[in-house]
Each structure stands twice: as C-alpha cells, then as structure tokens.
Image (spheres, grey):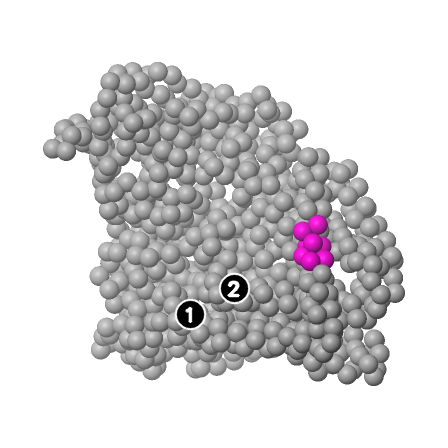
Amino acid sequence: LKRKYEETHLFFFFYAVWGEKEGLFYCPSSHFTLSLSTLSLTSPCRRHLEQITSVGPRPVGSPENEVLTVGYLLEQIEKIRVETAAGPHQLTVDVQRPTGTFSIDFLGGFTSFYDRVTNIAVRLEPKSGTHHLMLANCHFDTVANSPGASDDAVSCAVMLEVLHSLANQSTPFHHGVVFLFNGAEENILQASHGFITQHPWAKQVRAFINLEAAGVGGKEVVFQTGPENPWLVQAYVHAAKHPFASVVGQEVFQSGIIPSDTDFRIYRDFGNIPGIDLAFIENGFIYHTKYDTADRILTDSIQRAGDNILAVLRYLVMSEKLADSSEYRHGNMVFFDLLGVVVVAYPARVGTILNYMVATATFLYLAKKASLPGNGGGRYVRDLACATGVAVLSWFVTLLSVLIVALIVTLLGRSMFWYTHFYASICLYGTASTGKMILIHTLAKNLYFGVSCLGDLFFDVSLFLWCCSLVWLTQQGLCSAYVPMLMVAFPLATKLLLAKEFKHRGKHTYSVLYLFGLALPYVHFMFLIWVVFEIFTPIMGRSGTEIPPEVVLASLVTLATIFLSSFFLHFIYLVRSTKWILAGLGSVFVVMFLLMSCGLLFPYSGDPDSPRPKRVFLQHTTRTFHNLQGQVESRDSGLWINSFDFTGMQHVTPHIPEINESVRTHCREDRPFCGYPWFLPVKFLSKKNWYLPAPEVSPSSPVEFSLMSKEETSWGTVKMTFSVKGPSHMSLYLMPHRGASLSTWSFGDGTPQFDLSGEYFIFYSHGLDAPTWTFWDPDPSGPEGMISVAISGHYFFGQNQRTAQLEEILRRFPTWAFPSSWVSTYDMYRY
C-alpha cells in the first residue's frame, strides 16, 4: 500500500508540472487520504464543486446564492489574482447587480422583470489592454430544492480552474476573456440579459462559450452554435481535446420540441454575438432534483470538460478571427463527431454541393436501370414503384400497429413502465415494429417469383427513399441532411463495388462485405439514436400530464426501427423463411406485454445508486379573491399538487389516499391562470392538479400589493400604477375582460407581448435589498370592470418555505418520488 501511494503521488506530481508547462487543464492534487481500503484524490475542481454545493439549493435571492456562493467565488478569484499579479496578464473583478426587463417566446411566451440579481464578471487580459473579448458563461444559482451540482456548479468549478490556468500562462494573449459567473439563470435567463444589455464590457465581447447541463455528467456535447459564424465551429474542431458535437442536436433543440432553453438565446438575440453552447446530457432523470449531487459527477467528466474549454478558449484568444468576426460571419457549418473521437466539419454550402452530387449519382444509378432495352426498363420502373408502395405502406402499417399497442398500454394504466427499465420499451415496441415490418415484407415476397431479383429491387427502394429525404432536407436548408447523405453514399458505393461479388461468391460472402460497407453510416446513425433516447427518455418524466409518453416513445422506437432496417429489408427476400425470426420476436413481445400488464415493471425507482424519481410539485398556498369594490370575495387555503408526468398521482394515491380524484381541481376561466399560483406559464402542460384543504399560511414577509394611482391619458385610456413588495419570486397575471385589451405597459419595450389565450404572464425576481416593485398598465374602464390582476408570491428558501402541513405530507411520499415543495400566496383583484 505504501508503494502504491508513492507511485501514485509521483504520477500526479509529474502530471501537474507537465500540465502547467504545456498549459493543459489539470486538477493538481492537494492532498491524499490514505486508508486500508482506498486511495482517494481531492482536487481543486472537486473541492470547488463540493464547496459550492455544500450550502444546498441556491435560488435567486437566498443567502446561499447571494452571499455564501458569491463570497466563495470572490475569495477564489482573489487568490488567483494575487497569485498571478506578477505575470503578463491583469485580472479585474466586477460584481454587477442589474435591473431590467425583457420578453421571451419560451413556454408559450411571457415577460420577465428582474431587480438586483447578481453577476460576477472576471476580466482576464494582457496588461497592455485589449479591445476584443471572449466570454465564458456559467451559472451558480439553482432551482428550489436541488443542490444543482451538474446544473451548473460543476461548470463554475471548471471555469475557476480554467481561469487559474489561463492566468498562469507566460505568453500574453492577443485578446481578453470575460468569465461570467451568473447568479440568475434558472429564473429564465435573467442575469445573462443583465450582463449583455447593461455591462460596459459587453460591447467588446465578440463571441461566447456557454456551459450548461441537461443531465448529470458524461460527455459535454456541443448542441448549438452560431448564428452563422462557421469559424467558431472550426475553432472547436481544431482545438477541443475530446470533441463531441452534432448539428442534428442543434436543429432539434432550436426547433422548440425540447422544453428547455439556455443563456445562448440571450447572447444571440439581445447581444447579437455568436457562440457555442455545451451541455452534459447523460442521466437526465435526476436533473433538477435532490439527487443532483457532487458525488454523482465523475472526475473524468470534469477533466474532459476542462480540457475542452481551456483548449478552445486558449485557441480563440490567440485567433485573428475574433478581432473581426464580422468578416467571417456568413455561412453555417455541417458538423458531427464519429463516436466522440473526431469531429467532421465543413461549410454548409459545401454540404449542399456534396448532397446534390450524391443525389445525382443515385438518380443516374436508378435511371440506368430504368433505361434497359426492350421491356426491361419499363418493367423495372413498375416494379420499383410497386415495391416503393409496399415499403411506404409497411411503414404506416407498422407505425399504426405499434401506436395501437401504446394506446392499450395507456388504457391499462401502465404508462412509463420503461422509465426505469428502458430495455422493456425495446422488447415491447421494438419487437412489435420489427416483427410487423418482417411480416409485411414476407407476405409481399410470397406474391412474387424471382427472390434474388426482389432483393435487389428493395435495395433500390431504400436507396430511392433515402435519396428523396436527402433532397428534401437539403432544399429546406437543414444541415442535418448529412445523415441521409451518408445513408445514400455508402450503401450505393458498397453496392457498386460488390456488384460482381454476389454472382461469383454467393450470399454469405456478399452479406459480410455488404455489412462491412455499411458499418460507418450505421454506427454513426445508431450513435445519434442513442443520443435521442438519452435526451428524450428522461424528458418524458417532466413533460406534464398532457403529452402521452407511450405515443412519443413508441413512435421514436418505431422510427428508429424503420430507419435502421431500410438497407436490410432486401435480406428478407434473400432468405428462405422468416418464420423462426417472427416466432422469436413474437415470443419476446408476448412475455414483455404480460410483464407490463401485470404491473411487474414499475416506472420509478428510489435506488440511491440509480434513482428514477417521479416529480411532484407541492405548494402550501392561501388564495384571496377581491371584487370590484376591493372587498374580499372569497378566501381559501390548501396544498396545491402538480404532477409533472402523464401518470398523475395514480401511483402516489395508495401511499397518500387523500390525494385522489375527488380533490382534482378545475380551471376557473374567469380567474387569471385558473386562480392558482403558477410559478411559470405552464398550465397548458399540466392540467391535472389536486387541491387538499389546509390551514392558512402566514409568511413573515407577505405580498403587499396596492394601486398607487389611476390617471386618465390623452388617448382615452386609464393608466394604473401599482406597487408590490414581497418575496424574491413573484408571478403577475393580467387578464383583460371581454372587449378590452392592453395597449401598453411598463415592461419590456412597452408593447404587451405574448397573449396566452387572453392572459399575460410577468415573471419577477430580485436579489438582495431590492426596492418596491412598481409598474403600470392601461385600464380602459367599464361598468363591469375591464381587467383582472393577480399576484402570487413564492417562498423558495428560509423559514417561510416550510409549514407543518407540508412537512407532514412530505414524510408520507414514497422514496421513489421527488416532491419539490414551497409556500405560496395568490391574490386577485378586479378593476
């Protein structure tokens, strides 16, 4: 054991010295802890991460976020400044507390207002100064009730060490770097907006790197770049030590089908600067939960992220392109990695040419067959059209059949049976889709003679259909068209090279060589499919009660089966019989269906090593409704419960019988946002809610809402000015009555935006020592009142966050559930 300790100590000492000399990202050892069974290493990166998360959840406005974490970061930054003061670089620190407002088309669209949120901006530049800056961004705040190790403390820990490494460089940079540790990202991107629109350094920022998380650990993937500015992708490809990037992920994310957003949007839309967005994506099941702890993030993940960020930043601060990025602005890039080993990147215009070249070669290949002498050409075209019809029909029949299975699963009350056991979805939906495809083509084969001929024909069908998708995606300007390009180019080349092999050496040799030729595109495509399931499977656990997860997952599995089987369909026409394959697939399907229907596959898991929690939101709230005269019309209190997945509370009710269908809520259309304290405008995602009567809440800092003034304007409306004093998080709801509309207000650019079915949502948050919030709206007065205004306060931290009733019901939740709870109030007024 002593020898093991000495060897390990020597290794890390040597690595640390070499890393510093070469400018590599490293986490040098601080000390070793020796025991009889283990040899553990504690690094500065790990220490930063553990220190930041040790204070617990860090919502905006909490002492943990605004005092403890800010204090720790400033202390570490000051140590770096003192240590590197004699070097060629200077380090300047600025603590910014901006106030501002903006509108964003996220979650249906809403307006945001923030007051004195916190940013820590660190500027590292040559002592001679610089006019051009690179921005690196992370956030240290968290959602309520989560320690936020991956989202996003680990990124801030990495940034501290990258800052330390860059500050120790002996060669002066050509440009500077701003390290922004922002303290209000979870409040829907507020702090980044405050920096990019108000900080004096923002005008010199030419590009940025944003560090985020949608999972816990693993590789960090580049899933957004630009807009345009292909030189940024080229910089990442050239410099990153462990590249992992996909333009497919970028186009999927920017399509809006993933209910998430990052600071990338703010820098792009409000700063008009290009950037790179990176995020951890593995194990999204515990994202934004109590399980997002420092011990779950592997050192390898931290090291890999640090290596990449340090290398890319060092490359960019020495790049001439950063100084005048507008010269290199135009054009997009096609980029993708091959199993995380190497990234392939080329300009989109080159991709367009390449795509059309491959499509042209395919159509020439098919045209040659269609121009055979005599009746051969015409017969081939008819057979190709017929076989294409069979293939497309098999797709639709297969998809319909699997969706029927998904519907049966839903009606049986077994939704999300695969959430903990993902293999179960493959065994059920994968076998159903594969078996249906084989059955349809087996039936089609039995209607024809000349089996070998049909095998060749169905290869051409797959080639033709992939080529059609290639042309369509290219015409749409999507860089993801490279995927069908690979799925056309490699099979076509393989087919042409093996044209004589089938005749001379037989089926078996042909099959082996054929599979070898398809290896590259298929391995890459399967890797993309893995990424899709890695992202979308956990998302189903937080997509609300209205999106049926069985339909989503069954569709994804079926589409994956269809795509992967495309160039293997013709093997069905080459084999003598498929009955044993169908029998095997059918047996697996039946066994899995029985296991599922008997309830043996429970969706959730409380296993500490691999938790798959059910997400539930609980608010102990008091609601007060006022009439036109300002008198209290009604008042009640209760525990308002939201399920954020499709199963509702069906699995929780056996543990807490009071939460049942008899206490389901119903939306009151005459009240803003149904009369409930929605923290964000997501009522369209979660329409299944429960309300258990409970005693009133009495927070120590209740919401104080008042009408300050009411004055007529020259254009025939009434301007109403309000003041609000309350907790760090409040939601304002405005609902004009029938015949009335909002023409202007004091938020954003002054024009009311994002009318959510006749309602407007304003999200408010503040840091420490914020003044009273004042705002105004126009009120076109009428005899019956023209607008309803509601304000909800949310108490996410401190003594006000808990009540005896909340604590009592939280203890009764099963271990596989993650109930995130807080206290809230809702007050409605009519004017």
Position of 120 compared to 402: left or right?
left
Kindly indicate the quadrant of the structure image that contains residue 713: top left
Residue 641 horizontal/vertical position (percent): 51, 31
- The number of numbered badges drawn on the structure is 2
Amino acid type of the residue tagged 2 in the rendering: Leu
| Residue 329 location (% of width, % of height) | 34, 71
Q: What range of the chain is rendered magenta?
A: 389-397
Q: Secondary structure at mark 2?
A: helix
Which of 111/349 is in front? 349
At x 32% / y 80%, what residue is drawn?
Answer: 320
Q: CA distance from mark 2 to mark 1?
A: 15 Å
Q: Quadrant of the N terminus?
A: bottom right
Which residue is pictured at 74% across the width and 73% down the height? 375
The one nearer the camera, 140 or 358, is: 358
- What main secondary structure does the magenta stretch of the protein show? helix
SS for dot 1: loop
Q: For mark 1, does the 10 Å Cα neighbourhood hold few (<14), some (14 to 19), or many (20 or more) residues? A: many
Identify the residue position indicated by label 2 in the image.
473
Q: Is residue 436 visible?
A: yes
Asked which quadrant contains residue 562, the reply is bottom right
Q: Which residue is mark 1?
A: 332
Residue at 75% in and 56% down: 437
Q: What's under tag 1, amino acid-wise?
A: Asn
Pick the quarter of the image with the C terminus: top left
Residue 679, given in percent of the width and then of the height, sits at 41, 37
Q: Earlier in the sequence, mark 2 or mark 1?
A: 1
